[in-house]
Amino acid sequence: MALDQGTTSSRALIFDREGNILSVAQKEFQQIFPQPGWVEHDPNEIWSSQVAVAAEAMSRIGINGQNLQAIGITNQRETTIVWDRETGEPIYNAIVWQDRRTSKYCDQLKNKGLIGIIRQKTGLVIDAYFSGTKIKWILDNVRGARKRAENGKLAFGTVDSWLVWKLTRGRTHVTDVSNASRTMLFNINTLDWDEELLELMQIPKSILPKVASSSEIYDYTNTTFFATKVPIAGIAGDQQAALFGQLCTQKGMVKNTYGTGCFILMNTGSTPFISKNNLVTTIAWQIKGKTCYALEGSIFIGGAVVQWLRDGLGIINSSAEVEQLAMQVSDNGGLFLVPSFTGMGAPHWDQYARGLIIGITRGTNRAHIARAALESIAFQTMDVLEVMGIDTGIKPAELRADGGASANNLLMQFQADVLGTKVVRPKVIETTAMGSAFLAGLATGYWQNQEEIISLWQPDREFLPSNDLTSFLKMKTRWNDAVQRAKSWYK
């Protein structure tokens, strides 16, 4: 079973030995926006929704915990939860990775000249995106929190740690290297929490989880819910899990997950590769003592722009309608949409950028907006892949695509066109969940080795780039113009 705890929903999937999906259950949960730029979740709702879908996934095929070989966990990364060790109750809502409340503090760190040392230690840029500054905010702003933390009474975790804590009834406080590498507190060279960074952000080490590999038995479930003790045996942040689920196990292989955001990861092998173009270096996974690194470009708003068309503008009733609406026009009509609703991620890292639609004329209609929204996802991916190629000197033979929006054929074809590179969509696009299932299955011997699982990956469709280079070059130029106009708006 894979527990796939995402930004907008909790999901549970059950896989067989051939990598087939036997059962899926999904439940959305509330998004909380207390102030502009703030995004929160209720940690107890995350837990209850995750338990509910796990039960539903099992009941759909008439099994219980006795039929499960292992549980793998994959999660929205950087989202920060702090809870009381005795009661297990959160002391504040989960602060979501999209949240920008610590932007000013990040500016202070930059002004102190800490960009280089933080990048060297963690592989990350200084940004409100990562967990460290969120932990500091909770300790500084929740009454009595800092003193309780210093007295060893509080625990911090990303969502994986929270789920393991709940599944074991507080017996195990653990994370894996992939999630730890997203906190801005973990040294990716020494593979340990960094004392200097903890002191800088005034975070007591006692609050942090133990860091383990991505594929091992951490503990067994300790709830009546599974009717038996099931090994919890795989943990990886959602994007690293997707890289593994796409079987990008060789250096230079690249995937993009088209989810709420877009996350492009390139396998860079056994040594960390520090970007010169604002990409982040991250730990992809650690299996049997071998650590694999990746270069990553994070795009904050990917598929979420389609949700905005549905919930914000109301021009579609369901996300699935966007492709049909966009195909009502032959092109974008000169319209460009830059969806920097929560700032820009890689490679720009402008936390003060905001969304922009430009090129509107009297002839513009909702189909043009829908098409421009889809194209914005592909353009942002193009921006990341171009600097990834400059950094590494590698032009990938293909881009492996997964995530919900990869089902959109119009988007996938446009992506191949603007990249000039083949885009491949696998038969099973649930690669995030599959990656965590693979990691758990490797730890328990369900699959013997990586070679066995590589044979399970199968392509569904390949999208080959168009030969019409001139028109796409013009569009790239206009896109770049629009991006520049969206920058630094909120300042």
Image (tube, helix red, strand yellow):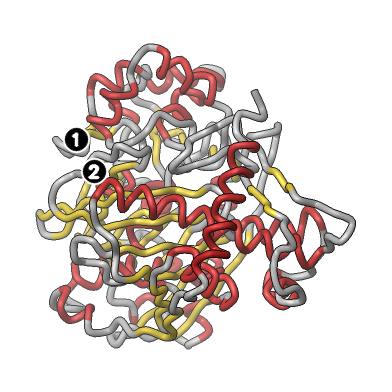
The residue located at (31%, 31%) in the rendering is 185
User: Where on the picture, by quarter, is residue 475?
Assistant: bottom right
Q: Are marks 1 and 2 in contact (CB under 8 Å)?
A: yes
**Disc 2 element:** strand
Residue 446 x/y as whole percent: 21, 78
- At label 1, counting other C-alpha atoms closer than 10 Å, the crowd grade (few under 14, some 14-19, many 20 or more) is some
The amino acid type of the residue labelled 1 equals: Asp
* 426 in relation to 148, above or below: below
Extreme residue toward the top, this view: 112
Residue 280 x/y as whole percent: 34, 42
* 450 in relation to 233, above or below: below
Quadrant assignment for the N terminus: bottom left
User: Where on the picture, by quarter, is residue 215?
Assistant: bottom left
The amino acid type of the residue labelled 2 equals: Val
Question: Which label's residue is closer to the chain start, 1 or 2?
Answer: 1
The residue located at (42%, 80%) in the rendering is 428
Extreme residue toward the right, this view: 362
**Disc 1 element:** strand
Residue 445 appears in the rendering: yes
Residue 351 x/y as whole percent: 55, 32
User: What residue did someone put label 1 on?
Assistant: 192
User: Where on the picture, by quarter, is residue 29?
Assistant: bottom right
Q: Disc 1 versus disc 2: distance between alpha carbons?
A: 8 Å
Count of numbered circles in the view: 2
- On the rendered structure, is 292 left or right of 324? left
The residue located at (64%, 37%) in the rendering is 486
The residue located at (22%, 33%) in the rendering is 187
* 261 in relation to 355, above or below: below
Residue 44 appears in the rendering: no
User: What residue did someone put label 2 on?
Assistant: 211
